[in-house]
Image (spheres, rainbow, N blue to C red):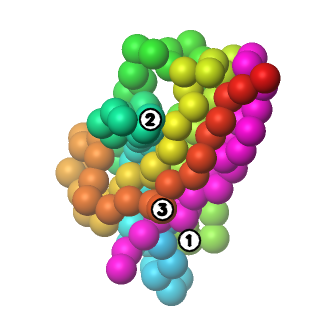
Amino acid sequence: QVQFVESGGGLVQPGGSLSLSCTSPASGNRRTFIPLAWFRQIPGNRRELVAAKSRNAKVYYADFVKGRFTISRVFVDSKDTLILQMNNLEPGDTAVYYCNGDRLHVDSAKYEGDYWGQGTQVTVSS
């Protein structure tokens, strides 16, 4: 089963910062998958798009994170890593954050793909 690998969640106080990372599934030394977006799901709510970076590098931010979160993608050791830098966190940001991506040949303008990570918990509380 294809799955992206997330890391970096945890507990932080309001106003604090966290950085989430998502790495493409291993596929030998070939670049096969690309992480595209971060979603989050608050208990009882639908999963929602937080931020995304398409293959052609266009960036999208949900209104509720503009000015606080930054998305970037780096290519190291034949794998792409999608990073979500979260600053000035609020209790309302508490959720499970999921990485989303697709195979490398995905439409260059798409913000989301067919594959997910297992999720990482972010809790903002004093």
Percent x, y for residue 107? 21, 51
Q: Where is mark 2, residue-wise?
A: 42
Kind of residue sitting beneath label 2: Ile
Give the mark nearest the N terminus, 2 or 3: 2
Which residue shows up at 54% across the image and 64% down it?
A: 5
In terms of depth relative to the viewer, which is nearer, 92 or 115? 92
Q: Which residues are magenta?
A: 1-23
Crowd rating for badge 3 (residues with CA inside 10 Å; few <14, some 14–19, many 20+): some
Kind of residue sitting beneath label 3: Gln
Per the model, the C-alpha gap separating discs 2 and 3 is 15 Å
Q: Quadrant of residue 125?
A: top right
Which residue shows up at 36% across the image and 80% down it?
A: 1
Crowd rating for badge 1 (residues with CA inside 10 Å; few <14, some 14–19, many 20+): some
Which residue shows up at 62% across the image and 21% down it?
A: 91
Per the model, the C-alpha gap separating discs 1 and 3 is 22 Å
- From this view, report whether residue 98 is shown above or below residue 18: below
